[in-house]
Structures are given as structure tokens and as C-alpha cells.
Image (tube, rainbow, N blue to C red):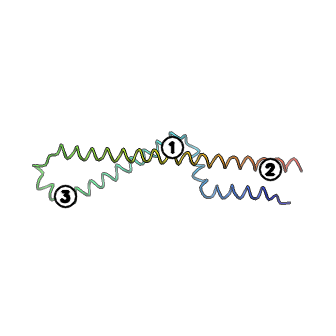
């Protein structure tokens, strides 16, 4: 005989596993600090590459000006400006990714706790049906 409680519970679990459960189960392999540090490091590295590319494009665009005024440019103030803007960019990206991935990990843990609760309920249903047989 069909047990509709089991079927509904198994369907909920299967839908979760197919959609968002894959990422949540993947995240459960990490400690929060390790996961957040890794994601912050990736975002800082990406921001650095992006900043370098944008800086290179600006330099190529202004190449004529840079070549004409190569002797008279104040390289110290130009370097300070570029470094300061780089530090601000990295700080914003780092803090933003720290907050975002921390919240994402916490939300994943809550969903995973609900998933494990449903698994325990399914196990209890199986144990009850085995005892009745």
C-alpha cells in the first residue's frame, strides 16, 4: 500500500536536492571562515585583475598624452592616486563579498538544517513502517 506521507516527503527532498540543494550540500563541506575567506580572496583577485585591465585601457587611451608629457608628469602623485583608488576598490570589494558570502553561508545552513530534519522524519517513517511489517 502506498504511504502518501512518505511520497510527499521524498518529493520535497528530491526537489530540494535538484535545485538549491546541490550548492547547499557543497557548502556544507566547508567551515564558514574557510568558505568566506576563499570567496573574499577570489573577489579581491578578480577586482585586481579588473582594475589592472581598466588601468591598462585608460593608459592606452591616453598614450599620446603620456608620451608627450613623459618628462613633465608628476609620477609620485599619479602613483599615489592610482594606489589610493586601488586600495579603496579592494576594500569595497572585500567587505562587500565578506558580508554577502557570510549571509549566503548562513542561509545555506538554515536550509540544510531543514533538509536534515525532513530526512530524519523520513527515516522515522521508514522505521515505523518496518516495525509494523
- Examine the rendered structure and indicate whether residue 105 appears above or below residue 53: above
- Examine the rendered structure and indicate whether residue 56 appears above or below residue 44: below
User: Mark 2 packing: few (<14 Cα in 10 Å), some, or many (20+)?
Assistant: some
Mark 2 and mark 3 residues within 8 Å of each other at the beta carbon:
no
Q: Earlier in the sequence, mark 2 or mark 3?
A: 3
Q: Earlier in the sequence, mark 3 or mark 1?
A: 1
Disc 2 on helix, strand or loop?
helix
- Distance, label 3 to label 1, CA atoms, is 40 Å
Residue 67 location, quadrant:
bottom left
Q: Dividing the image into 4 quarters, which one contains the N terminus?
A: bottom right
What residue is shown at x 59% (from left), y 55% (from top)? Answer: 20
Residue 28 location, quadrant:
top right
User: Mark 3 packing: few (<14 Cα in 10 Å), some, or many (20+)?
Assistant: few
Judge left or right: residue 129 versus residue 34: right
Residue of label 2: 125
- Distance, label 2 to label 3, CA atoms, is 71 Å
What residue is shown at x 87% (from left), y 47% (from top)? Answer: 131
Mark 3 and mark 1 residues within 8 Å of each other at the beta carbon:
no
Disc 3 on helix, strand or loop?
loop
What residue is shown at x 18% (from left), y 43% (from top)? Answer: 76
Q: Position of residue 64 (x, y in %)?
A: 15, 59
- Distance, label 2 to label 1, CA atoms, is 35 Å
What residue is shown at x 75% (from left), y 48% (from top)? Answer: 121
Residue of label 1: 35
Q: Which of marks 2 and 1 is nearer the N terminus?
A: 1
Q: Where is residue 102 in the image (x, y as percent from the top left)?
A: 50, 44
Judge left or right: residue 84 versus residue 130: left
**Which numbered dot is residue 62?**
3
Judge left or right: residue 132 versus residue 39: right
Judge left or right: residue 94 versus residue 56: right
The residue closer to the viewer here, 34 or 105, is 105
The residue closer to the viewer here, 31 or 96, is 96
Amino acid at each position: 500500500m502506498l504511504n502518501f506521507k512518505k511520497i510527499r516527503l521524498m518529493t520535497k527532498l528530491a526537489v530540494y536536492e535538484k535545485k538549491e540543494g546541490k550548492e547547499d550540500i557543497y557548502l556544507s563541506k566547508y567551515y564558514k571562515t574557510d568558505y568566506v575567506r576563499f570567496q573574499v580572496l577570489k573577489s579581491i583577485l578578480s577586482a585586481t585583475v579588473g582594475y589592472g585591465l581598466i588601468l591598462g585601457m585608460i593608459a592606452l587611451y591616453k598614450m599620446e598624452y603620456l608620451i608627450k608629457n613623459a618628462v613633465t608628469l608628476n609620477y609620485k602623485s599619479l602613483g599615489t592616486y592610482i594606489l589610493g583608488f586601488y586600495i579603496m576598490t579592494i576594500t569595497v570589494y572585500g567587505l562587500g563579498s565578506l558580508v554577502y558570502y557570510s549571509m549566503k553561508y548562513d542561509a545555506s545552513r538554515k536550509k540544510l538544517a531543514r533538509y536534515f530534519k525532513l530526512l530524519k522524519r523520513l527515516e522515522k517513517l521508514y522505521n515505523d513502517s518496518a516495525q509494523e511489517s
